[in-house]
C-alpha cells in the first residue's frame, strides 16, 4: 500500500509533472549549469540531496509549529530562512564528514539557496498534500516521496538536456538562434514529449 | 546617471528578461495569458520598489557578512504582504499564479537589484531603479503574454483574473472582429494554436522572441561595425590626400 503510494508519487513528480518542463521551477540552473554533463550531474545530485531534507524539514515546521500556533501566513519567510540556513548547515556538515562528497557537490551548494525548485516544492507540498486532517507521518511520507521524485526528474531532464547541448555546440545553428534561443526551443520539444506522458497514471 | 536614464534603462538596454535572462521561471510559467503576465509584473514592481527603498534606507546598519539573509527577510516580508493582498482582492489571480506568488522571494532580479544597486545608492535613486526595473520586467512579461495568448486564442482578453475597472470579462482585441467583417459564423478561437497556452509553448515562444531580439541586435552591431569601418576608411583617405597635397606643394616649391 505504502509502496504503491511511494511509486505513484515518484512517477507523477518525476515524469508527469516534471519540475522543469511542466512546472518551470529551476530554470536558472537548467540554462546555466547544463553546458557540461559532468556539472549537470553534480548539480542535480546536490539539488536532490537538499530538496529531500528541505521538504522534510519545512513540512514538519508547517505542520507541527506554524499551524499549531496559528501563524501559517508567515510560511514564505520561515521556509526561505530555513532553506538558506539548511544549505549552509549541509555544506558545513559535508565539509567535515566527507571530503570527496564536498569536492563533487561543494561548489553547487551555495547556488541552491536561490534555486526556486527547492522553495517551490516546499510550498507545493503544503498546498497539494497538507490538509488539517491528514496524519503527520502520512503527510511527511508523501512530501518526501514527492521531493525524491522531483529531484530525480530534475536530474533526468538536466542530464538529458546537457547531453543535447553538447551536441548543439558543434552543430551549425543560424546566428540569430545561437545560444539560449535554440536551447529554449529544444526544451520546448522535450516538454512536448513529456506532455504525452500525461495520462499514464 | 540622470534620474530619467536610471528609470528608462530597465526597459530595453538592461531589460531583466530579454538581456540578462533573470527571473526566467515566472517569465515561462505565468505568461500563458496577457492578464496573468500583467498581474505578476505589477506585483513584482511593488515588491522590488519597496524592497529597494527599505534596503537603501537600512544599508548602514546591516553588517556586510549577513547582508544576503537580511535582504531575503526584507523581500520575503513584502512578498507576504503581496500574497495576502492578492488572496483578498484578486482571488482568481492568486489561484492562477499559484506557487509562483511566494516564489517572488527567490526571483534573482529582486535580490540582484538589492545587492547591485540599492546597497550602494540613495533611497530616491533606488526607488526609481526599482520602479524602472520592475516596469521593464512587466513589459517583457506582457510582450510574452500577448504573444502567447494571441497565438493560442486569436485574441486578447481582460477581466478574467484582474477584476478591476470592468464588471465582466471583455475582449480587448480579437481577429474575429476583422474576419466577421467579411464572413459570419467563423470563430478564430476554434483554430488557435493551443500548444502556446501549454508549457511547451512557453519555451518555444520565449525562444522565438529571444531569437528575434538577437537577430535585431546582430543587425545593429553589423551596421555599427560597417559605419566604423567606413569612418576609418574615410580618415585614411583624408590623411592620404593631405599627404598628397603636402607632397605636391613640396614639389612645387622644389620646382621654383
Image (cartoon, coloured by chain):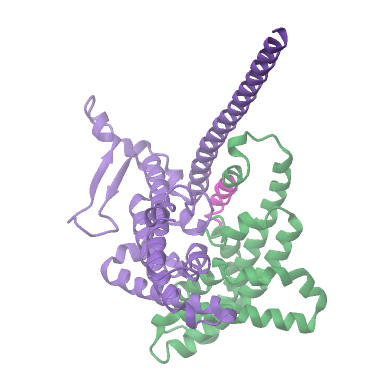
- Taking B58 as reference, is A35 above or below it? above
Residue A88 in the magenta stretch? The answer is: no
Q: Quadrant of residue B222?
A: top right
| Viewport quadrant of the C terminus of chain B | top right
Instruction: Say which of A63 and B101 sits in front.
Output: B101
Q: Is residue B171 visible?
A: yes
Kindly indicate which chain is depicted in purple in the rendered structure: B
Q: Quadrant of residue B87?
A: bottom left
Residue at far top of view: B255
Residue at far front of view: B256
Colour seen for chain A? green
Q: Is residue B97 visible?
A: no
- Taking B155 as reference, is A1 above or below it? below
Instruction: Say which of A201 and B187 sits in front.
Output: B187
Instruction: Say which of A35 and B116 sits in front.
Output: B116
Q: Main secondary structure of the magenta part?
A: helix
Locate residue A8 relative to residue A156 in the image: left or right: left
| Viewport quadrant of the N terminus of chain B | bottom left
Residue at far bottom of view: A69
Q: Position of residue A130 (x, y in %)?
A: 46, 78
Q: Position of residue A112 (x, y in %)?
A: 62, 70
Residue A192 in the magenta stretch? The answer is: yes
Residue at far left of view: B167
Q: Quadrant of residue B128?
A: bottom left
- Taking B9 as reference, is B182 above or below it? above
Q: Which residues are magenta?
A: A187-201
Which residue does the image show at 30% across and 67% down from the upper left?
A: B91
Locate residue A97 relative to residue B169 in the image: left or right: right
Which residue does the image show at 47% across and 90% down from the upper left?
A: A65
Amino acid at each position: 500500500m505504502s509502496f504503491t503510494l511511494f511509486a505513484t508519487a515518484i512517477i507523477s513528480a518525476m515524469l508527469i509533472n516534471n519540475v522543469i518542463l511542466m512546472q518551470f521551477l529551476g530554470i536558472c540552473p537548467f540554462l546555466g549549469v547544463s553546458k557540461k554533463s559532468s556539472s549537470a550531474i553534480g548539480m542535480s545530485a546536490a539539488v536532490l540531496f537538499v530538496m529531500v531534507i528541505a521538504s522534510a524539514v519545512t513540512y514538519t515546521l508547517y505542520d507541527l509549529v506554524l499551524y499549531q500556533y496559528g501563524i501559517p501566513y508567515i510560511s514564505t519567510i520561515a521556509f526561505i530562512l530555513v532553506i538558506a540556513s539548511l544549505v549552509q548547515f549541509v555544506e558545513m556538515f559535508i565539509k567535515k564528514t566527507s571530503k570527496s562528497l564536498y569536492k563533487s557537490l561543494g561548489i553547487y551548494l551555495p547556488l541552491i539557496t536561490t534555486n526556486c525548485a527547492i522553495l517551490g516544492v516546499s510550498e507545493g507540498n503544503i498546498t497539494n498534500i497538507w490538509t488539517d486532517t491528514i496524519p503527520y507521518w502520512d503527510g511527511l511520507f508523501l512530501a518526501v516521496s514527492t521531493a525524491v521524485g522531483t529531484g530525480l526528474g530534475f536530474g533526468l531532464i538536466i542530464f538529458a538536456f546537457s547531453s543535447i547541448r553538447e551536441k548543439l555546440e558543434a552543430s551549425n545553428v543560424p546566428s540569430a538562434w545561437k545560444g539560449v534561443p535554440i536551447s529554449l526551443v529544444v526544451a520546448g520539444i522535450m516538454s512536448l514529449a513529456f506532455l504525452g506522458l500525461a495520462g499514464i497514471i | 546617471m540622470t534620474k530619467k536614464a536610471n528609470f528608462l534603462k530597465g526597459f530595453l538596454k538592461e531589460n531583466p528578461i530579454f538581456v540578462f535572462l533573470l527571473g526566467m521561471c515566472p517569465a515561462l510559467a505565468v505568461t500563458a495569458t496577457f492578464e496573468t503576465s500583467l498581474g505578476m509584473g505589477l506585483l513584482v514592481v511593488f515588491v522590488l520598489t519597496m524592497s529597494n527603498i527599505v534596503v537603501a534606507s537600512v544599508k548602514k546598519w546591516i553588517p556586510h557578512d549577513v547582508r544576503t539573509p537580511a535582504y531575503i527577510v526584507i523581500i520575503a516580508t513584502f512578498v507576504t504582504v503581496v500574497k495576502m493582498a492578492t488572496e483578498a482582492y484578486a482571488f482568481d489571480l492568486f489561484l492562477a499564479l499559484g506557487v509562483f506568488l511566494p516564489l517572488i522571494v527567490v526571483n534573482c532580479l529582486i535580490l540582484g537589484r538589492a545587492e547591485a544597486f540599492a546597497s550602494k545608492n540613495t533611497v530616491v535613486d533606488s526607488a526609481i531603479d526599482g520602479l524602472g526595473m520592475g516596469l521593464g520586467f512587466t513589459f517583457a512579461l506582457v510582450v510574452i503574454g500577448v504573444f502567447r495568448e494571441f497565438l493560442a486564442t486569436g485574441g486578447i482578453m481582460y477581466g478574467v483574473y484582474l477584476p478591476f475597472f470592468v464588471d465582466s470579462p471583455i475582449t480587448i482585441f480579437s481577429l474575429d472582429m476583422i474576419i466577421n467583417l467579411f464572413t459570419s459564423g467563423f470563430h478564430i478561437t476554434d483554430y488557435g494554436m493551443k500548444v502556446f497556452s501549454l508549457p511547451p509553448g512557453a519555451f518555444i515562444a520565449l525562444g522565438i522572441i529571444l531569437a528575434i531580439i538577437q537577430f535585431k541586435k546582430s543587425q545593429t552591431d553589423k551596421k555599427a561595425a560597417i559605419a566604423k569601418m567606413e569612418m576609418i576608411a574615410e580618415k585614411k583617405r583624408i590623411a592620404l590626400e593631405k599627404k598628397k597635397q603636402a607632397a605636391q606643394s613640396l614639389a612645387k616649391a622644389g620646382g621654383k
